[in-house]
Image (cartoon, rainbow, N blue to C red):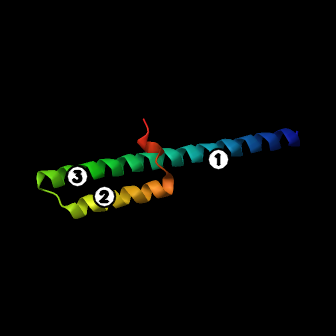
Amino acid sequence: MAGFLDRAKEQAQRGLTQGRQKLDEVQAQRAGNDLLKRLGAAYYAERRGSGSPAATQQALQALETHIATHGDDFLRP
């Protein structure tokens, strides 16, 4: 009986670990999408004359930092 419970506990732990990993991936993907949207908005504002090159550069740097940390998988369809 103890062996069964140990295996069940192991499987539950694996499931939790996989769930956490998937959650982390989804959160990183959402953050990347938000940064990409922010970069687009900054660029658009700059082109229209209501934004600044510094704001666009800052948004680009934030996106590049995110990509360096989490990868660029969120850029793929």
Where is residue 49, by image quadrant?
bottom left
Q: Position of residue 52 (x, y in %)?
A: 18, 61
Give neighbour class at mark 1: few <14, some 14-19, many 20+ (Cα, 10 Å). few
Mark 1 falls on what kind of element?
Answer: helix
In 3D space, how far apart are the residues under numbered discs 3 and 1 (Cα atoms)?
39 Å
Mark 2 falls on what kind of element?
Answer: helix
Q: Earlier in the sequence, mark 1 or mark 2?
A: 1
Q: Residue at x 44, y 39 (%)?
A: 76
Depth check, front residue: 28 or 57: 57
In 3D space, how far apart are the residues under numbered discs 1 and 2 (Cα atoms)?
33 Å
Depth check, front residue: 8 or 31: 31
Q: Which mark is residue 59?
A: 2
Q: Could you tell whether 74 is left or right of 60 in the image?
A: right
Q: Is residue 30 above or below residue 60?
A: above
Q: Is residue 61 above or below residue 75?
A: below
Give neighbour class at mark 3: few <14, some 14-19, many 20+ (Cα, 10 Å). many
Disc 1 designates what residue? 17
Give neighbour class at mark 2: few <14, some 14-19, many 20+ (Cα, 10 Å). many
Cβ–Cβ under 8 Å for marks 3 and 2? yes
Q: Which mark is residue 43?
A: 3
Q: Could you tell whether 59 is left or right of 8 in the image?
A: left
Question: In the picture, which quadrant includes the C terminus?
Answer: top left
Q: Earlier in the sequence, mark 3 or mark 1?
A: 1
Q: Which mark is residue 33?
A: none
Q: Position of residue 55 (x, y in %)?
A: 24, 61
Mark 3 falls on what kind of element?
Answer: helix
Cβ–Cβ under 8 Å for marks 3 and 1? no
Q: Residue at x 70, y 42 (%)?
A: 12
Extreme residue toward the bottom, this view: 54
Three-letter residue code for mark 2: Ala
Q: Residue at x 40, y 50 (%)?
A: 31
Q: Position of residue 41 (x, y in %)?
A: 23, 50
